[in-house]
Amino acid sequence: MTRKQEETACTANIPPPLVVSSAGAEHTRILAARLGRLLVAGDFVALVGPLGVGKTCFVQGLAAGMGIEANITSPTFIIMRYHPGRPALCHVDAYRIADADELHDIGIWDFADHCVVAVEWAERVRPLWPPDAIVVEMQFADDRRVISISGSGERWRQLAAELEQ
């Protein structure tokens, strides 16, 4: 089997991204809450997209779906905010992070095993993403937002199957 055939075989069983067009903030929160209900401690959610596309809004929905009732705001200036719950949520904003090492030094991995880690501006710290990261890519599309949720490995297979229902 050639390398290309091996790569194709490895990715053949990975479900395609879930792509949704969001009409507004409330729709984005509802979609995120569906995902949030499925998350468990150890999950890493990488949020990618331009300024103002709704990354914080998406994290608000995640938290609601996880049963966290706290007021979720962007931790832009403090970098990381911890929200207790079952599981807890570690909300990170990597916008002001110079490089992945800085985020590592802050201690993000001290939380990773016992909470869901959601990172806004995750593209800035791509080297830190675990192999099974759940990737939420958000883009502007006229007066809507296009949200693509994807991943790899067994965890994504589980989530994709649940989200399809």
Image (tube, rainbow, N blue to C red):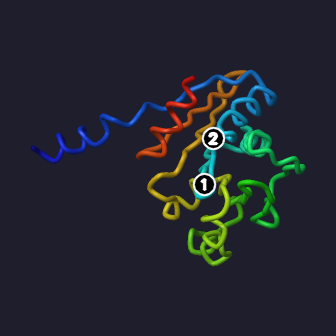
Which residue is at a point 60% across and 73% down the rendered structure image?
Answer: 104
Q: Is residue 69 left or right of residue 10?
A: right
Say what amino acid the circle numbered 2 marks.
Answer: Leu
Which residue is at a point 69% across and 22% down the rendered structure image?
Answer: 142
Quadrant (top left/top right/bottom left/bottom right) for the N terminus:
top left
Q: Is residue 14 left or right of residue 113?
A: left
Task: Pick whichever of labels 2 and 1 is earlier in the sequence.
Answer: 2
Q: Nearer the viewer, mark 2 or mark 1?
A: 2
- Residue position for label 1: 122
Quadrant (top left/top right/bottom left/bottom right) for the C terminus:
top right
148 up-or-down from 90: above or below: above
Quarter where residue 22 is shown: top right
- Residue 134, given in percent of the width and then of the height, sits at 54, 46
58 up-or-down from 70: above or below: above
Say what amino acid the circle numbered 1 marks.
Answer: Ala
- Residue 103, given in percent of the width and then of the height, sits at 63, 70
Which residue is at a point 65% across and 25% down the rendered structure image?
Answer: 141
Label 1 packing within 10 angstroms: few (<14), some (14-19), many (20+): many
Q: In this view, does 107 lie to the left or right of 16?
A: right
- Residue 108, given in percent of the width and then of the height, sits at 65, 69
- Residue position for label 2: 38
- Residue 106, given in percent of the width and then of the height, sits at 68, 75
Tell which residue pokes out farthest to the left in this image.
Answer: 1
Label 2 packing within 10 angstroms: few (<14), some (14-19), many (20+): some
Give whichever of 141, 17 is nearer the camera. Answer: 17
